[in-house]
Image: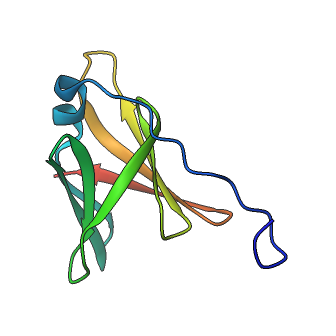
Amino acid sequence: MLYGKPYKLPIDVPVDSLLLKKYVGHYVFTPTFSMDITVEEGKLVAQPVGQPKTVMLAEKDNYFCALEKDACLEFLINETGSCNEAVLHQGSSEHHGKRQ
């Protein structure tokens, strides 16, 4: 508990750099909200347009959470092994974004 609320300690499992590169791109969640995903120093970095960069910690090889925000990204791998969609989990809501 932290400040009277449940708190989950962050996990950061190692993810292969080739897999991280599959997630790199620009994802559009709504006409007014999109984000760029990059890899910096071996870590996945999310940057919503017009906002600062956030390092994402890997909980699984396709599921990453922001340490300082209540937001996680789940990358969906299709049958050909590529990633064209991400799901933003924020609180109790989910937003699907397509890679452009």
Residue at the (25%, 78%) spot, across then down: 52
Residue pushed farthest top? 80
Locate residue 13, reporting x and y percent: 44, 32
Colour setup of the view: rainbow
Of 85 and 35, which appears nearest the observer? Answer: 35
Q: Quadrant of residue 20?
A: top left
Locate residue 91, reporting x and y percent: 64, 66
Residue at the (33%, 16%) spot, across then down: 79
Residue at the (30%, 80%) spot, across then down: 32
Give the tally of numbered discs.
0
Image-based side of 71 in relation to 44, left or right: right
Q: Quadrant of residue 22?
A: top left
Locate residue 73, reporting x and y percent: 43, 51
Q: Quadrant of residue 76?
A: top left
The N terminus: image quadrant: bottom right
Image-based side of 9 in relation to 47, left or right: right
Of 17 and 25, which appears nearest the observer? Answer: 17
> In the figure, 54 relative to 88: above or below?
below
Locate residue 56, reporting x and y percent: 37, 53
Residue pushed farthest right? 4
> In the figure, 69 relative to 18: above or below?
below
Residue at the (19%, 28%) spot, across then down: 17
Image-based side of 25 in relation to 48, left or right: left
> In the figure, 37 relative to 59: above or below?
below
